[in-house]
Amino acid sequence: MNFSTITTTIVKFIKIEHKKRQKQGVVIGLSGGLDSSVVASLAVNAIGAKNVFGIIIPDYNVTPMNDVFDALELARKLKIKSRIMDISDVKNQFLKYLYPNEFATGNLTARLRMCVLYYYAGIMNRLVLGTTDKSELELGYYTKHGDGAADLLPIADLYKTQVRQLAKFLKVPDSIINKESSPRLWVEQTAEKELGISYEKIDNILQFLDDSNRDKKSKIFNSTDLSLVQSIVKKNYHKKIPAPICVLPKNI
C-alpha cells in the first residue's frame, strides 16, 4: 500500500469535511492506543495542532497508567492541547442504581467517554473524530453510541493491520504501535483475547469476504477461523450504522 497517498487522502478528507461543517476544530478521545494516535496525527496534518484537542478519559479502576502516559506523550509530541477526565467516580455513581453486569458496565464506560467528547465538542464548536478502523467496523467490535459514535471516521476504510503500518509511516511512538489493542472496558481486556483470533487472521478473512476482493485473494485461513469471523459479524449486525430508516411511499 502507498501510505503517502493514503495519508494525503485522509488529510484532505478531514480538511474538507471540517471546512464544510464550519467548525472551529476537532476533539479526539486519546486512549494511548493505536487507532486514536493515528487519527490524532492525521488531524494535526489536516487542520493544525491548535485546532485539535485531545481528551484522555481513563477509568482508573481499569485503565493502565502506561496508557495515560502514552496519550500524554503523544499530545506533547503533536503539540496539541489535552485534558485528562477520570470517569471512575461518575461511573460508580451510575452503578449504585444499576443491575450488576460486567459486559453492560463495559458498554457504559464507552458511552460515558463519548458523552465527555460530545460535551467538549459542543461547547468548543468542534467535531468528534471517530477512531474506529475497518476491522472493528465490519466485525461490529465497538459500542453503539459509545466509541461507535462520531462525526467523522477517518480510518474506517483501513483494516487494523493497515492502520498499524500507517502508524509506522506517521512515526507514531513504538510503545503505542506495539501495544496490544484493547477498548479498556474491564481489567486486562485485550481485543484479540476477547475475539478469540488475531487481527492478522481477521483482516485476511474480512478481505476475502469482501466481494470486490474475493477473486483476487487466495484462501490463507482455515474453515474454523472463517466460521468464527462470520459468526462475530452476524452477531453484531444490529450495530450497523446508521440505523435503518423506514422509507414511506411518496404518495401515501
Image (spheres, rainbow, N blue to C red):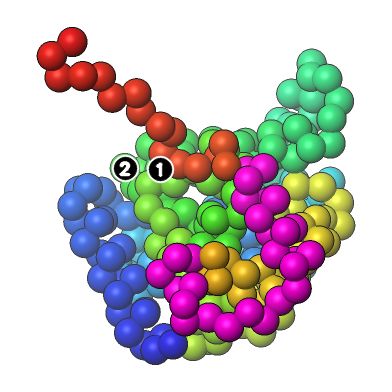
* Image vertical order of residue 22 relative to residue 200, above or below: above
Residue 80: give x, y in percent of width and height.
45, 66
Total residue callouts: 2
Mark 2 lies on residue:
125
Quadrant where the C terminus is found in the figure: top left
Separation of marks 2 and 1 at Cα, in angstroms: 6 Å
Q: Secondary structure at mark 2?
A: loop
Quadrant where the N terminus is found in the figure: bottom left
* Image vertical order of residue 234 relative to residue 205, above or below: above
Mark 1 lies on residue:
121
**Direction from residue 197 to residue 187 in the image, left or right:** right
Question: From this viewpoint, which residue is outermost toward the top?
Answer: 252
Residue sitting at 53 percent across and 71 percent down?
A: 207
**Direction from residue 94 to residue 164 in the image, left or right:** left
Looking at the rendered structure, the kind of residue marked 2 is Asn
Residue sitting at 40 percent across and 62 percent down?
A: 154
Residue bounds of the magenta highlight? 210-236
Quick check: marks 2 and 1 in contact, CB under 8 Å? yes
Check residue 213 for magenta coloring: yes
Give whichever of 27, 186 is nearer the camera.
Answer: 186
Q: Residues within 10 Å of mark 1 (few under 14, many from 20)?
A: many
Residue 85: give x, y in percent of width and height.
63, 46
Which quadrant of the structure image shows residue 34?
bottom right
Q: Secondary structure at mark 1?
A: helix
* Image vertical order of residue 106 relative to residue 164, above or below: above
Residue 16: give x, y in percent of width and height.
21, 62
**Direction from residue 157 to residue 139 in the image, left or right:** right
Give whichever of 149, 230 is nearer the camera.
Answer: 230
Residue 69: give x, y in percent of width and height.
70, 68
